[in-house]
Amino acid sequence: MRSWVIGVLLIVGAAGTRAEPLAVKRLSDFRADGGLSGWELRQVEAEQLPGEGLRFRYPAWMAGRGKWPAMVLDFGNGGFDEEDWSRYDRLVFEVANESAGVAQLKLRLDDRAGKQGVHLFAIPPGQSHRCQVDIAVLGESINSSQVVHFDLFMSQPGADYDFTIAEIRLEADALDVEEMELRRDPFGEGLIEVEARLRRVGFCEVKVLQGEEVIARYEESTSRLEWKWKGSAPGEYRVELSVTDQAWSSEPAVQELGKFKILPEEERPNFVAWTEPTTRKVMLHSWPEAEREFFSREQIAVGGVAPIRIDMGRNEREGAQVVWLVCRDSTRLRFAVEELRHVETGIDFPAEGTEIHQVGYVFTKEPESYTVDFSGWWPDPLLPVVEMEAVPGECMPVWVSLKSRVNTAPGIYRGKLGIWKDGEREGEWPLEVRVYDASVPDSSSVRTAFSLYDGMLEQVYDGRVPRQLYRKYQHFIAAHRLNVDHLYRSTPPRITDLRYFDRRGQLNAFNVLYLNAGRDYSRKGLAKLAAELDPYVEELRALGLIEKAYFYGFDEVNADRFDEMRLAFGFLKGRYPEIQTATTARDPSLGLATGLDEVVDIWVPLTAAYDPLAAGAARERGDEVWWYICIGPRHPYANWFIEYPAVEARLLWWMTYRQRADGFLYYAMNRWPNQKEPMRLDGNNKTNWNPASFKTANGDGCLFYAGPNGPISTVRLENVRDGLEDYEMLRLLGAEEADELCDRMISSPREFRGDVEGFGRVRRALLERLEGLSAERKQ
């Protein structure tokens, strides 16, 4: 989609700390003459500074003290006097952290109906931090036109934290039309869709014109425009969109979105197809984007189509999608990659790694914990079917995946995708693969901890999971460059499994045992634990596996469990010094302020709470710092919910490289609480699978599905694996150049580009640079 900005001249209020905003509204400025008026302080100590500003302290949590010290400001009654925040772009306040450790301040905002939105700010020690909440994002969780409660709090702080703050304000910029697009049906029947996404509500007017004559018009005040129209008279038309910033200006900005044709009935094709990258999800009822070329059945039959193009390195897997759409008659299709050969040497591309899947769909219900644009049928499973049925009006994406070897010769390979319709040869689609002289290592360097839940396999397979079937799942996970692991295991993993995957170069970390809060860590309890672990650990030592082992525990605990963690981890480190301890405990200082760095070796903060400075300081002390996602964070942070863009699952690994995170943790790969049977087709491409996991989060804790004969991959998991391969190539390139490429897509974990075509260009630049390095070494 394209974007543009409506420029206006009106200036209201003072300039902001960065570019001058269009309008500013101060909610609180802490002036000496009553700066704390209207504020409620809960366990927080505050002192008015001369002029403007406030110094305040959140005291360390201790038993008997409330868990959430807070500063609260309510609408009216002496509090802030602007309830309607929807006219603004952001809430902003500058906070200076005068403490020794990283602070995690949390902001809760409530609307009149009681809905809440919570935002987290990680503030480095000795620094001032601009805390910002985008109103568009806020509007996904609460009604931004009825904001009544501002609650700045901390969760069980592990130490005293001192801050200063000057003012809290709302800011508005010129209205930004972030995305806009014209989609037209590829059959020339006259149906069009106009979509636009604005940063905040504006007055939108759409016109369909033939020449200068207005054929149709639509008007709406909205931040998300969606309009459909269908014409009937053959001819050529164009579409205009004008947007007016109702809050701050009356001057409209006009943009032509594009042109479309309505064809006579006898000229309309029955069958069209086009290509898409694997980083884009193809919705069930979708059309090709306005700029994307598509082809008719007649063009495909004679080979008059642009080739499917795949760029890849050596020893990696890459693919593409071909999307089929029929207008009237259902069609059964079959595909095969044929005659894919090096254009210079004639050598065949490796055939054994070639896979062709039909992209299936799962039905999602609206989730409670995050906002989505659409609930219903979403593309996700990659179905292992031979014949695929395309039905009128529904997209049928075909996932074509290739696997190169370490010794695959660089260069261009040309072949074709053979196509059979209803059992007869229909035609072929040219296929072009560029293999760069850049090889992905066999083993992954980034450490991973993704859980395989045995109990969920037993639930789906009616309690019977033969060893051979279980092995399929293990191989499947390892083939996606992830450790076969379990974070919450109550007994250590099988030594034979560890040795097997270690010998194959598919193991770089594994959890020995989960240490949960509330366990018996008395002298007697620890002695019992040691008796269970001593012989196992001795075997790990003897087999040379000890350095890859860690103990995981105290999942997401707060300060009230720190003493318990100190006791348990301290015992383990004293008895088994070679084995690391890992935790997602909520200590923003990563042990510096709490002293927990003496007993914790691997810190795992949420991506939204990851602070590069604190992580760097922890690494200087000899610790590792990973990060993780789960049910959160939500947008604007990246995640891989089913409803989120596919490219985010890949970009998360570019972020992992850019932030120098040592590992990635994910609590489950197969949490299927609502599924009692394997996945099956319920129609041509729809499945019986309920993708809701934690409450109503779709795809959370679930990266693959259970098929009748083994695991079924997903669009998301394939992008995870592709991202892991990208990570290894970034490492091969070197920090300076790799960082520059990352920065083209990523500014921070919450600021990144979801531009699929842009990502493709950046990744191609990565391959080209690695090939250049290889050429230099050979000289």
Image (cartoon, rainbow, N blue to C red):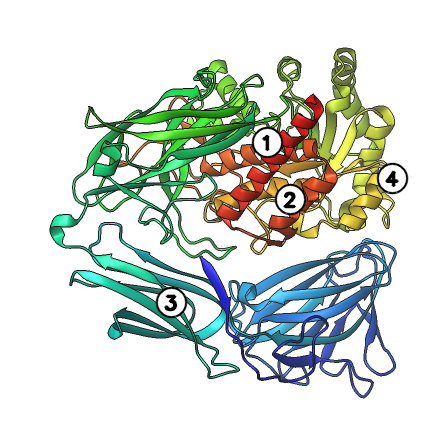
Query: Going from the N terminus, do you reach mark 2 or mark 4 first?
Result: 4
Q: Position of residue 760 (x, y in %)?
A: 52, 42
Inter-mark Cα distance, 2 to 4? 29 Å
Residue at far bottom of view: 33
Mark 2 or 4: in front is: 2
Q: Quadrant of residue 622?
A: top right
For numbered disc 1, what is the local secondary structure? Answer: helix
Q: 68 or 294, which is in the foreground?
A: 294
Mark number displayed over residue 741: 2
Q: Earlier in the sequence, mark 1 or mark 4?
A: 4
Q: Which residue is mark 1?
A: 725
Q: Nearer the viewer, mark 2 or mark 1?
A: 2
| Residue at the spot 64% in from the left edge and 80% down from the top edge | 24
- Kind of residue at disc 3: Glu
The residue tagged 3 is: 256
Mark 4 residue crowding within 10 angstroms, few (<14) / some (14–19) / many (20+):
few
Closer to viewer: mark 1 or mark 4: 1
Please determine whether, in this image, residue 459 is positioned above or below residue 103.
above
The residue identified by callout 4 is 621
Q: Nearer the viewer, residue 500 or 688?
A: 500
Between marks 4 and 3 in the image, the one whose residue lies nearer the viewer: 3
